[in-house]
Image (spheres, rainbow, N blue to C red):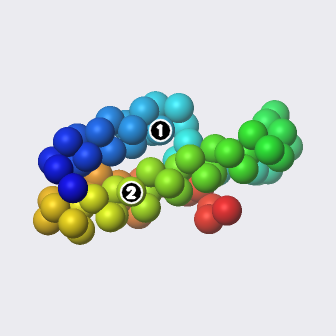
Amino acid sequence: MSTRSWLYSGMAIRKAYDLGLHRDVGISKHNGPSVLSRTESEVRLRAWWGCYIMDIMVSATLGRPTTIHDFTFDAPFP
């Protein structure tokens, strides 16, 4: 695994944050039901958790710090 993988995973994570994939899109306490379909919600969750797992794996393999910290997201595990 090269250091490029660490750079590319970091870019993917920043894009995921930008798209709001780190947020729980389920039923909101204030806004009622989500505007996303169940399928869209599931795809968002899987994409986020894919980024999360990749971040852990790449960081552990290369001995670099992780980009995602547990307190920065509230997306539930799919």
Within 10 Å of disc 2 (Cα), the crowding (few <14, some 14-19, many 20+) is some
Q: Nearer the viewer, residue 67 or 61?
A: 61
Task: Please state if 3 lies on the left or on the right of 17 as rendered.
Answer: left
Counting residues from the N terminus, which is met first, the one under dot 1 or under dot 2?
A: 1
The three-letter amino acid code for the residue at tag 2 is Met
Q: Position of residue 58 (x, y in %)?
A: 27, 59
The residue where tag 2 is placed is 54
Task: Say which element carries label 1.
Answer: helix
Residue 31 in sight in this render: no
13 vs 22, nearest the viewer: 13
Do tag 1 and tag 2 residues touch (Cβ < 8 Å)? no
Q: What is the crowding at mark 1: few (fewer than 14 residues within 10 Å), some, or many (at least 20)?
A: some
Q: CA distance from mark 1 to mark 2?
A: 13 Å
- As shown in the figure, which amino acid type bears the numbered disc 1? Ala
Of the 4 image quadrants, the one containing the C terminus is bottom right
User: Given the current orientation, which residue lies at the most extreme front position?
Assistant: 1
Residue 75, quarter of picture: bottom right
Task: Please give the residue where the numbered disc 1 appears in the rendered image.
Answer: 16
Residue at 16 percent across and 61 percent down: it is: 62
Residue drawn at (39%, 57%), measured in percent from left and top? 54
Residue 42 relative to residue 38: left or right? left
Q: Quadrant of the N terminus?
A: bottom left
Q: Which label sits on residue 58?
A: none
Residue 65 in the image: above or below residue 11: below
Image position, residue 67 (x, y; %): 29, 52
